Amino acid sequence: MTKLKQNLSNFFSLFTSLSTLICCALPTLFVTLGLGAVVASGLSTFPLLITMSRNKHWFFLGAFLAIGMNFYYIYGQKKKVCKVSTEESETPCETASRWNKIILWCSVGILVIGFFYSYLAFHIFKFFGLI
């Protein structure tokens, strides 16, 4: 059951961090780069993005909770003992653990980028006179 919880946690942390990137960070980045027409066509094609960006606080809260839960499952629990193999290749347990950590840190990176462009970029750009 714990393995299922960890797999679901990985999925939700990656999904929620990607949703924050798509709804909030990418449109801001495109407008900053002068690609407002791309944002306009994307919003007309996918009008759900407007609703997502209006409720971005809830998406970020869900992403932070999912990633926090994933950190607990990967780093906070007792270390699981994997079978030691005499071969030089990884055991399935070690491979899964390595991929879980890769997915977790990719999710954290995506969330940080989304948070920066959603909440901090405007103030930083305004401070330096770029806007």
Image: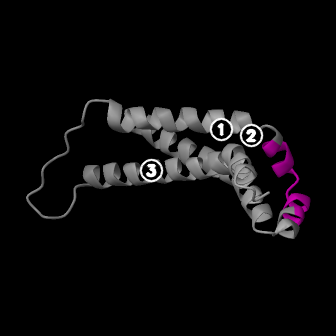
Furthest residue to the left?
86
- Percent coordinates x, y for residue 3 in the rendering: 39, 38
For the magenta stretch, what is the residue range? Answer: 40-53
Magenta region, main secondary structure:
helix
Name which quarter of the figure residue 76 lies in.
Answer: top left
Which mark is first along the chain, 3 or 2? Answer: 2
Circle 3: residue type: Trp
Instruction: Give the residue number, with chain letter if any, for mark 3.
Output: 105
- Residue sitting at 75 percent across and 68 percent down? 33
* Residue topped by disc 2: 56
The residue under the point 91% across, 60% down is 44
Residue at the far right in the pictured view = 44
Mark 2–mark 1 Cα distance, whole angstroms, equals 6 Å
Q: Mark 1 points at which residue?
A: 60
The correct choice, above or below, for 55 with respect to 114 in the image is above
The answer to whether 125 appears left or right of 51 in the picture is left
Element under label 3? helix
Residue for point 80% across, 57% down: 131
Residue density around tag 3, few if under 14, some if 14–19, many if 20 or more, within 10 Å: some
Residue 38 position (above or below residue 51): below
Viewer-proximal residue among 14 and 106: 106
Where does residue 124 sit, x and y in percent of width and height? 68, 49
Asked whether disc 2 touches disc 1, contact meaning CB atoms under 8 Å apart, the reply is yes
Mark 2 secondary-structure assignment: helix
Whether residue 3 appears in magenta in the rendering, the answer is no
Secondary element type, mark 1: helix
